[in-house]
Structure formats: structure tokens, C-alpha cells
Image (cartoon, rainbow, N blue to C red):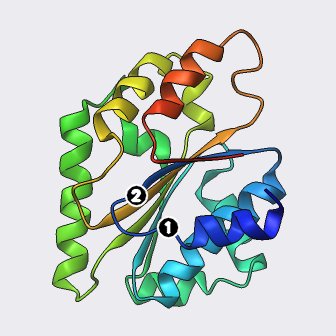
Amino acid sequence: MDNRNRVALIAGLELGEHAIFFYQNVDEKHNMLFAFIQRGIEEGLQGIYLCGRQGTKGIRFAMKDFSIDVLGSEKARLLKIIDASEWFTKDGVFKTSSVMEQQYRLLCESAAQSGIRGLRVVVEVDNLIYGRFTSDLLAYESTIGHKIELPLTMICAYPALYGSSGEEALLSEIKKSHDIVIF
């Protein structure tokens, strides 16, 4: 699949879909995931970006370079940039899937109170998969499953190199937890 078709596929994901995207480099990650967020903002959906190793400041600067009005979108409650480690862990322990589901539910309820009909969620997992949270992340992905019962669309972003070092079985399990797999 060429780059333009992948951008169209990712940007066009519908509410309730759960996709996984394997990126080759940071530029590809930004192009695909920012298009997803930007399309949601244009449609009046709230973008939630759970960022990994690049950090919240790095994502903010990169979004600005991508021509996303970060400050304006945040003021309009159409964009939240959150550190994925803070979202997934508390005091060094991976949160249970039920706690994270409640977090997503609260985000959806808060958005609905502001007249926003749904969320577009990006989950960067690069800071979780190389640490001690790999099995926890797999359990989380399995719990989220294929169809999400909340008014949100989720895309999980994994570095393409993940799985290249004897981790093929784990990678296969992670892929099974998603409606759409994009390389």
C-alpha cells in the first residue's frame, strides 16, 4: 500500500474502530498519526494523543510543524496531548484494563458535555513495549478488542522494528486484537 493510501485509510477510520499502525521512522509516524488527529479536529472530534518517547513537548512542536493549531485546538477542547506512561501506569505499576476503560469513558463523557460527539485516540507504545510492560500491554490490547463500545476511534502506533528480534509470537497476538493492521 502506498503512502497516500495509508494516510487515507488512517484518516478515514470510523468511530468504534481499533487499528494498529507499524511505522518505519518518526516522519512516517507523524504524517500518518497527525493526519488522523487533524481529520478528527476538522470533523469536530476531540483528538487524544498519548505520546511515547518523543514526549509531550516533542509532539506539540511536531504537530505545529504539521500545521495543526495546537493551542487553538486545545483551547477549543479538541486536542489533548498526554504522556502515555502517565496514562498507563501509576507508581510504576501498569493500570488494570478496567481503570483505563474508565479513563476513556470519562474522556468521552467530558467531550460529550462540551458537545463533542466522539474521540480520535492515538496510543504510542514505544515507551511501553521495550520495558517491563510488554505482557501488560498485550493484556490491555486483548481487552480493548476489535470493536470499541465507546464513541472513539483508536490507533495504536508501534515501531516497525518491534517483532524483528524473536518477538514474532507476541507481535502476532497484538495484531489479532485490532480490526485493521497497517504497515
Q: Relative to 37, does residue 16 appear above or below in the rendering? A: above
Q: Does dot 1 land on a helix, a strand or a loop?
A: loop
Q: Residues within 10 Å of mark 2 (few under 14, many from 20)?
A: many
**What is the three-letter code of the residue carrying label 1?**
Leu
Residue identified by numbered label 1? 13
Name the quadrant containing residue 69.
bottom right
Q: Relative to 118, does residue 132 appear above or below in the rendering? A: above
**What is the three-letter code of the residue carrying label 2?**
Glu
What residue do we see at 53% from left, 33% from top?
175
What residue do we see at 71% from left, 9% from top?
166
Q: Are marks 2 and 1 in contact (CB under 8 Å)?
A: yes
What residue do we see at 36% from left, 70% from top?
119
Asked whether, in this view, residue 60 is left or right of residue 86, the answer is right
Q: Nearer the viewer, residue 183 or 25?
A: 183
Residue 90 seen in this snapshot:
no
Q: Position of residue 84 (x, y in %)?
A: 48, 45
Q: Does dot 2 land on a helix, a strand or a loop?
A: loop
Q: Relative to 162, does residue 112 appear above or below in the rendering? A: below
- The Cα atoms of the two marked residues, 2 and 1, are separated by 7 Å
Asked whether, in this view, residue 60 is left or right of residue 146, the answer is right
Q: Residue furthest top?
A: 166
Residue identified by numbered label 2? 17
Asked whether, in this view, residue 30 is left or right of residue 121, the answer is right
Q: Position of residue 51 (x, y in %)?
A: 56, 52
Q: Position of residue 156 (x, y in %)?
A: 53, 47
Q: Which mark is residue 167?
A: none
Residue 152 seen in this snapshot:
yes
Quadrant occupied by the N terminus: bottom right
Q: Residues within 10 Å of mark 1 (few under 14, many from 20)?
A: some
